[in-house]
Amino acid sequence: CGAKPVFADIQADTLNINPAEIERKITAKTKAILPVDFAGLPADLDTIREIAARHHLVVIEDAAHAMGAEYRRKKVGNISDMTVFSFHPVKAITTGEGGMVLTNDADLANRLRTFRHHGIHYNSEKPWQYKISQLGYNFRLSDIHCVLGLGACRRKF
């Protein structure tokens, strides 16, 4: 995609990204902020979202270790523009591999669905008609992987 990651330092007390460092790293080329919820502890999402709003940036939260976590009485996955969870074998829920992206933005959700399904855009009135409207990949879980995930959910939650 041509993106170049720029790293910002962390806070010593939380090991999460330091919002003041984020602010110092933003340039005209910056498109998104990607905080990582370290060891299940959510980053300072309110401050990060304020910074993102001031600079018209998207917040993509890496919550791979924060499944079920809360930030100020809100479940992680309902706060950032997009939140990514991992289903790797060492995570709370596993499908053997893979993950999930959550968003409350309908446009982003449609773009993500298209991206994960070979870039195919379906005609809602005639679902047998479709076109490849963008670059995409095969990022869908197989049925077998889904069964593993369902089993993990029943054991954990």
Image (spheres, rainbow, N blue to C red):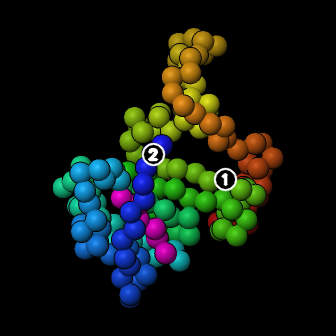
Q: Specify the farthest residue to the left.
A: 54
Q: Position of residue 74 (x, y in %)?
A: 39, 64
Q: In the displayed image of the protein, which residue is found farthest to the bottom? A: 13
Residue 120 seen in the current view:
yes
Q: Which region of the structure is painted magenta?
A: 33-38
Q: x, y percentage for residue 132? A: 56, 21
Between 107 and 29, which is closer to the camera in this rendering?
A: 29
- Mark 1 crowd level (few <14, some 14–19, many ≥20, 10 Å Cα): some
Kindly identify which residue carries mark 2: 2
Q: Residue under label 1, please give it.
A: 98
Badge 2 crowding class, 10 Å Cα cut-off, few under 14, some 14 to 19, many 20 or more, is few
> Closer to us: mark 1 or mark 2?
2
Could you say whether the residue bearing mark 2 is in a helix, strand or loop?
loop
Residue 25: quadrant of the picture: bottom left
Q: Residue at x 62, y 53 (%)?
A: 99
Q: Residue 134, relative to residue 95: is it above or below?
A: above
| C-alpha gap between disc 1 and disc 2 | 23 Å
User: Dot 1 lies on which element?
Assistant: loop
Q: Nearer the viewer, residue 54 or 123?
A: 54
Residue 37 vertical position relative to residue 81 in the rendered view, above or below: below
Amino acid type at mark 2: Gly
Residue 35 is a magenta residue? yes
